Image (cartoon, rainbow, N blue to C red):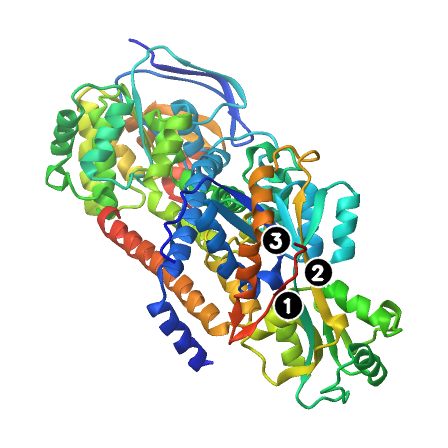
Amino acid sequence: MSGEIAEGLRLVATLDLRLWEIVALSLKISLTAVVLATALGLPLGAAVAVVRFPGRDAVIVLLNALMGLPPVVVGLLVYLLLSRAGPLGELGLLFTPGAMVIAQTVLITPIIAALSRQAVADAWREYEEQLRSLGARGVGAALTLVWDIRFSLLTAVLAGLGRASAEVGAVMIVGGNIDGVTRVMTTAIALETSKGDLPLALGLGAVLIAIVLALNAAAFLIKEAAQRRYG
Amino acid sequence: MGLAAAALVGFITVASTTSTEQSGLFKHLLPIFENKTGIQVRVVALGTGQALDMGRRGDADVVFVHARALEEKFIAEGHGVRRFEVMYNDFVLVGPSSDPAGVAGGKDIVQALKIIHTTRAAFVSRGDRSGTHFAELRLWRAAGVDIARDKGPWYRDSGSGMGPTLNTASGMHAYALTDRGTWLTFKNRGKLVIVVEGDRRLFNQYGVILVNPSRHAHVKRQMGQAFIDWLVGREGQEAIAGYKVGGEQLFFPNAEN
Amino acid sequence: MMLPLALDEVSFRDIIKPLSLEIAAGPSTIILGANGAGKSVLMRLMHGLLAPSSGKIFWRSAGRQAMVFQRPVMLRRSALANLVYALELAGVADCERQALEALEEVGLAHLAHRPARVLSGGEQQRLALARAWALHPEVLFLDEPTASLDPSATREIETIIKAFDASGTKVVMATHNLAQAQRLGDEVIYLHQGRVVERAPVAAFFSRPASAEAAAFIKGELPWV
């Protein structure tokens, strides 16, 4: 097995533009999805943490449950939506990177919402009385809170990014793994494996893992620096 | 070649099969067409059944598969305009070099399957409504075996593409039916070898169909037809014949001209 | 004398039984009682952090209130930035200068740019008082402000509280520390199991408690003194 891994890494190191196009596309899609999912999920999570409304407990349970959405199910649902035979077919989004971004956003918004809700709720318990005593209310208080715990929220965002980078089910179905257009690292690995070209699949896998590791290391260092600076 | 590439004018979506894509044919063929016409061809590779379904939903402009009966049904249903024959390749029966059923070297696929059934030798099927799967079922019928009723633990439905099926067969030391193209590019053979080939009944005919624009208004009729015309025309047919793996030609052009 | 605060038959679940109370401006008021007597809840009702289950609370003036809690809560910013945040919320002009003045008042000017949360417990509590000072509140509520601090930090806090009192801020402080009550208070409201059992000037309360519960509390027969 180590022979195949070595061969895989060598292939990757000497491989052409095509490989790095695949890597670039993977990053573009997952990062875009994470940005959208954060824009949607973070305010949602913060609002659910701070605002009391009837049925809130049910919403919390639902958000937590949706974290476990199977990617392939999300892919199927988005496919049915975007297919020409489906309600949004007119948009012509199926089998484009746009569809992949949509599917991944759907997949990871609950993760970011649920995890940020947890972080904000914990912080709200600590800050609520003091903030209200100072006259901070509603959206203003929530924003102050979110800004204060921004580095903890980075963990939630990273969890979403990790999920998006690693999944293959959703992007395969809505993207179609089209060579040069919608082929990303995970779908390329799936293809090479099914072709029996294991060294190449392993090589791509190594690149994927390296990227995810680098992102996590960066986040860890950022959090450490923040902890030292702000306490 | 020395010819400048044509500027990109648009793209079409072609639903085809995993075995065709994995053979590497498209990587060879499509750049020639794209350079000439400026039309980007985006291939979504699925099983034959799924590819035709994609056409039914209108998610593809052209379908390019290898299951004649299903293709004709597709047209009869009104989803396709007309079927053009393009090329054929062949299937081969692969199996463990130890050959437990004793069929190696034979030229009669139907006979070989009869023996595999009688000896209950391990066999892996794609089981995924693909062209290969339908070809396999046809051959069992020809061998007088009602595979749906007669299958036992010796017969495994992998429900997946050609590559994973071969992976499974390799791992389980089982027989499997595969297209030659996938076999030639498959790198994980283990102890698998070709045991039966050359029987005319193993020939696998490809057809290309334009998805019916009357049914699906957004289908890119002109660009799709341009692709079909090229495939069955002299240039496309020569390009198909020119595709070789390890010096061997995989696909044999046979468009009516 | 202007009445800043009146409670009319205010109750809160079964922690505060319906009580009526008037808090006048001027003398510093100590809310005294054992743990569980309801001091914290009463403070929060008066400051408006809790809504009463029944009854009404009247504020006769619109002056600012501030509250300091047993554990200070600071944002992940510098000491100065925490004060500026509070001042901006209150709509005060020239926030940074006012904030610096408040820091000097409590002796923390040299830590202005230190992250607030790395300061010691005593320093953070002083910072909380500086934050309150900068707002120039009409009323300052304090809920057991030194319960988590060591004696020297406690002394520093008490000095600042006396400064508030001297500057005309009405001080309302909850504590179970008898000696502290005597040092800082002008009058005592004694709370027992959610009821105001006695109210008297400090000297009178400690030398001649009128109620049996207060007498027992002072004598130390209640376990939490």
Which residue is label 1 attached to? B162
Q: Which of marks 3 and 1 is nearer the N terminus?
A: 1
User: At label 3, which amino acid type do we have?
Assistant: Val
User: At label 1, which amino acid type do we have?
Assistant: Met
Labelled disc at residue B232: 3
On screen, residue A209 above or below A125? below
Q: CB under 8 Å between callouts 2 and 3?
A: no
Q: CB under 8 Å between callouts 2 and 1?
A: yes
Q: Label 3: how many residues lie within 10 Å, few (<14), some (14-19) or many (20+)?
A: many
Chain ID, mark 3: B
Q: Is mark 1 on a helix, strand or loop?
A: helix
Let me know if residue B220 appears in the view: no
Which residue is label 2 attached to? B130
Q: Is residue A116 left or right of residue B204?
A: left
Q: Is mark 3 on a helix, strand or loop?
A: helix
Q: What element carries label 2?
A: loop
- Disc 2 to disc 3, how far (Cα)? 23 Å
Residue A92 point in image, percent of width and height: 56, 37
